Every structure is written in structure tokens, then in C-alpha cells.
């Protein structure tokens, strides 16, 4: 009887050992799956990090470009202001030139009248000298 019980206990121990081995294999398989999943998550995190770095770099470049555009617009506005001031100056100079031209025209007309009067006087004088 004792031998039968020992045999029975040995069989139960063998079954329990098989069950434990199967459970250990299940835990090892599940652990391998978890490790693979973690590795996949780590890879995705690295990809997200790369994309985030690329986005940050692009935003920085865009900010620098916007700053440069703003500076160029400001310079263009200053240039436009200078051009406007120059146009006003040219307009004033043209007005002054027009006024001066009018004065020269008036003076030349007056001089022309004086020349005609002088011509008459000279002709009368010469006529008087010839007659005398």
C-alpha cells in the first residue's frame, strides 16, 4: 500500500511539475510578447522625438524668416518714405524752376521791348547824323 501511495504521489508530483512547466512557458511567452511590445513603444517614442525635433527646427526657421520679412518690410517702408520726400523736393524744385523761368521770360520780354526802343533811338540818331 505504501508503494502505491508513493507511486500516486510521484504521479501527482509529475503532473504538478508538468503544469508548473507549462505555466512557466506561458509566463515566458507572455514576457517575450511584453518585451517586444515595449521595444515597439520605444521605437515609436524615438520616431515621435525625431518628428518633434524636426517640427521645432522648422518653427525656428519660420520664425527667423518672419523676422527677416518684417525687417525687409520696414526697410521698404523707410525707402518709400525717402522716395516720397524726394518727390516732394523735386516737385518744389520744379515749382521754383517754373517761377524762375517765368521771371526769366518776363525779363527777356522786357529786354526785348527795351531793345526795340533802343533800336528806334539808334536808327533815329543815325538818321539824324546822316541828314546833318
Image: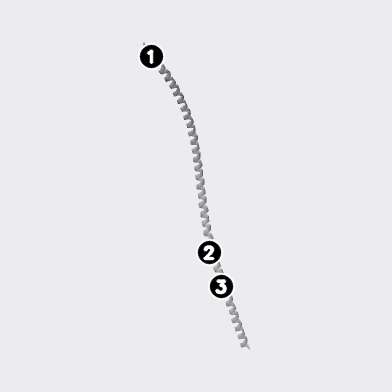
Q: Is residue 113 left or right of residue 11?
A: left
Residue 97: percent from the left, percent from the top?
46, 30
Earlier along the polypeptide chain: callout 3 or callout 1?
3
Count of numbered marks: 3
Question: Could you classify mark 3 by the number of other residues whose Cα lies within 10 Å: few (under 14), some (14-19), or many (20 or more)?
Answer: few
Q: Front-most of 5 and 33?
A: 33
Residue 111: percent from the left, percent from the top?
43, 22
**Cα–Cα gap, marks 3 and 1:** 142 Å
Q: Is residue 9 left or right of residue 59?
A: right
Residue that protrudes farthest toward the bottom in the picture: 1
Provide the residue designation for mark 2.
43
Q: Nearer the viewer, mark 2 or mark 1?
A: 1
Q: Nearer the viewer, mark 3 or mark 1?
A: 1
Viewport quadrant of the C terminus:
top left
Question: Could you classify mark 2 by the number of other residues whose Cα lies within 10 Å: few (under 14), some (14-19), or many (20 or more)?
Answer: few
**Cα–Cα gap, marks 3 and 2:** 21 Å
Q: Front-most of 24 and 119?
A: 119
Earlier along the polypeptide chain: callout 2 or callout 1?
2
**Cα–Cα gap, marks 2 and 1:** 121 Å
Provide the residue designation for mark 3.
29
Provide the residue designation for mark 1.
127
Q: Front-most of 60 and 131?
A: 131
34 is higher (above) or lower (below) than 8: above
Residue 95: percent from the left, percent from the top?
49, 30
Amino acid at each position: 500500500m505504501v508503494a502505491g501511495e508513493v507511486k500516486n504521489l510521484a504521479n501527482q508530483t509529475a503532473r504538478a511539475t508538468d503544469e508548473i512547466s507549462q505555466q512557466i512557458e506561458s509566463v515566458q511567452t507572455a514576457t517575450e510578447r511584453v518585451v517586444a511590445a515595449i521595444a515597439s513603444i520605444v521605437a515609436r517614442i524615438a520616431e515621435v522625438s525625431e518628428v518633434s525635433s524636426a517640427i521645432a527646427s522648422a518653427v525656428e526657421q519660420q520664425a527667423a524668416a518672419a523676422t527677416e520679412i518684417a525687417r525687409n518690410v520696414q526697410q521698404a517702408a523707410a525707402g518709400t518714405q525717402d522716395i516720397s520726400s524726394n518727390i516732394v523736393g523735386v516737385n518744389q524744385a520744379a515749382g521754383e524752376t517754373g517761377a524762375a523761368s517765368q521771371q526769366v521770360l518776363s525779363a527777356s520780354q522786357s529786354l526785348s521791348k527795351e531793345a526795340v526802343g533802343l533800336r528806334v533811338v539808334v536808327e533815329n540818331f543815325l538818321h539824324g547824323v546822316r541828314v546833318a
